[in-house]
Image (spheres, rainbow, N blue to C red):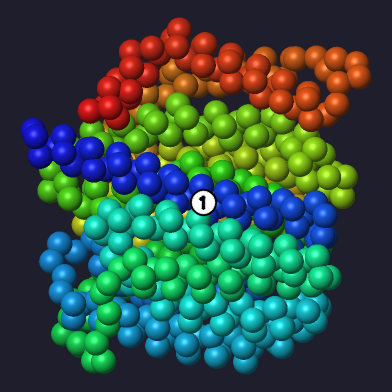
């Protein structure tokens, strides 16, 4: 029991530092994004970078072979395992960067936007910088070194943001986003090497690489199929609808992703190493999963619902008048994020308990459903794309309910009991926020803050009245 409590304390401590890491990385990056969106850049600038990043993200998934995650999951690793992962990842990152640079002109021609080529060429160089520190990042995460990761994200985010704003002030336009990415990545990698004293040797241990590849390749397969589904909307909008529309979609997704990263990645980052340590005790895994599920329901889901309710004020007050076409798109994507939040750590759960093959199958199903929904929704423009993403999430929630019952014995009835209190609180909050009047003469910013405060109070009051024992249980669990 003492070991379990100690493990719980370590997980919570790691979770707090993981939260700080995500706030540092995503919070600072999001602040810079808001400044650039409000004062310097337009929808086409963001569309170009969104399309270029879609190619770079695919290269990141393919180039790593899932070896970083394999290092975290495997119980016993040596320096030879680490060295094999480092050189394979760095070598393929270099080859993929060269390939993207060579194909950049073709992609620019297809999109009808000449500026895509040099932007993609520059961002491709970031692949090498990223993979130079990928093993160090995995080792820190494996050892719950989230404090070092948080400090590194804070420093890199601030310095990268300063460079981006200076570039924008000098008239750099879209290149301010490129500078933000490259400078942040370079500084992050330097700090990772400084934080983690391990260094690779000049060898390629084939035997150790073969030990990690089965898990790594399955994780890569999961990443590829998820990428195909997650990026289908961007490619369809960018190549067939328009770069400016892609910019609108990207900005909406960027706002939602910032909240997702800060709110859910903290749990997700800790979930894999924690579930991996208890992987042979399914009862403990199920108990830990329910606690994380409840926390997401109580804390995270209402925030996304709130974002959907005040999207008009968010667009007008925070982003400015040039983004007034954003509210409906943002509301639909926020609703989709609310549905996905409680299930955000399901994939790490399956990988941790040795079900990576099942995780790959579910990811494949999810990508197929998303592509089908997006293709249908594209006929109705950007709003159709957003509704397609919402429909996909509704379908996948049903799939995951079945998977959880099969793999860890968690029935849908148990999940529904957990849902009862938070859903009532969300319903009360939504009614209050929608019905609150706007008083004559109130500035939009004050009205937005008033709706946020009133919604938060009504949600907490309703939740406390209906589900007080569960809230107290979450508090006691985290405290213990």
Q: Residues within 10 Å of mark 1 (few under 14, many from 20)?
A: many
Task: Locate residue 18 relative to residue 71 in the image: left or right.
Answer: right
Task: Locate residue 420 relative to residue 239 in the image: left or right.
Answer: left
Q: In this rendering, does residue 188 appear at all?
A: yes
Residue shown at 62% from the left, 92% from the top? 102
Residue 431 pos. (x, y %): 66, 16
Q: Is residue 130 above or below residue 334?
A: below
- Residue beneath label 1, please? 24
In the structure shown, which secondary structural element does the residue marked by tag 1 occupy? Answer: helix
- Which corner quadrant holds the N terminus? top left
Residue shown at 59% from the left, 14% from the top? 458
Residue 285 pos. (x, y %): 21, 40
Q: In this rendering, does residue 283 appear at all?
A: no
Task: Locate residue 116 relative to residue 159 in the image: left or right.
Answer: right
Q: In this view, does 358 lie above or below 398?
A: below
Q: In this view, does 154 lie above or below 83?
A: above
Residue 337 pos. (x, y %): 56, 42
- Which corner quadrant holds the C terminus? top left
Residue shown at 9% from the left, 34% from the top? 2
Residue shown at 18% from the left, 81% from the top? 80
- Foreground residue, 51 or 89? 89
- Foreground residue, 309 or 152? 152
């Amino acid at each position: 029991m003492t070991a379990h409590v100690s493990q719980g304390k370590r997980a919570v401590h790691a979770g707090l530092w993981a939260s700080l890491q995500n706030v540092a990385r995503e919070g600072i990056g999001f602040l810079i994004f808001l400044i650039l969106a409000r004062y310097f850049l337009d929808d086409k600038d963001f569309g170009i970078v969104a399309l270029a990043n879609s190619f770079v993200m695919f290269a990141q998934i393919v180039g790593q072979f899932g070896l970083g995650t394999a290092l975290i999951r495997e119980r016993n690793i040596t320096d030879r395992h680490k060295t094999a992962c480092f050189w394979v990842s760095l070598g393929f990152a270099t080859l993929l960067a060269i390939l993207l640079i060579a194909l950049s002109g073709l992609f620019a021609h297809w999109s009808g936007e000449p500026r895509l080529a040099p932007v993609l060429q520059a961002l491709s160089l970031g692949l090498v910088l990223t993979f130079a520190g990928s093993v160090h990042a995995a080792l820190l995460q494996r050892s719950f070194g989230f404090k070092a990761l948080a400090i590194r994200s804070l420093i890199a985010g601030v310095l990268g943001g300063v460079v981006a704003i200076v570039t924008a002030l000098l008239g750099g336009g879209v290149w301010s986003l490129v500078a933000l990415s490259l400078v942040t990545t370079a500084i992050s990698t330097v700090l990772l090497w400084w934080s983690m004293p391990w260094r690779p040797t000049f060898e390629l241990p084939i035997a150790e690489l073969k030990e990690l590849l089965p898990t790594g390749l399955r994780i890569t397969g999961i990443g590829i199929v998820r990428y195909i589904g997650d990026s289908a909307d961007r490619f369809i909008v960018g190549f067939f609808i328009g770069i400016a529309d892609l910019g609108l979609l990207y900005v909406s997704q960027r706002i939602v992703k910032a909240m997702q990263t800060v709110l859910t990645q903290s749990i997700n980052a800790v979930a894999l190493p924690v579930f991996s340590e208890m992987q042979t005790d399914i009862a403990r895994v199920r108990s830990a999963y329910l606690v994380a599920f409840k926390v997401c329901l109580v804390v995270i889901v209402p925030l996304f619902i709130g974002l959907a309710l005040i999207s008009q004020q968010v667009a007008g007050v925070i982003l400015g008048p040039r983004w007034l076409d954003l509210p409906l798109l943002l509301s639909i994507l926020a609703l989709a994020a609310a549905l996905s939040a409680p299930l955000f750590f399901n994939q790490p759960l399956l990988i941790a308990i040795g079900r990576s093959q099942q995780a790959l199958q579910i990811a494949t199903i999810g990508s197929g459903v998303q592509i089908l929904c997006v293709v249908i929704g594209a006929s109705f423009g950007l709003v159709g794309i957003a509704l397609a993403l919402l429909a996909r999430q509704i379908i996948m929630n049903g799939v995951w309910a079945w998977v959880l019952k099969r793999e860890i014995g968690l029935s849908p009835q148990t999940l529904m009991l957990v849902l009862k209190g938070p859903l009532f609180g969300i319903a009360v909050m939504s009614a209050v926020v929608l019905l609150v009047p706007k008083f004559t003469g109130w500035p939009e910013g004050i009205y937005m803050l008033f709706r946020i405060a009133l919604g938060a109070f009504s949600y907490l009051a309703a939740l406390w009245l209906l589900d007080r024992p569960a809230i107290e249980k979450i508090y006691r669990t985290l405290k213990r």
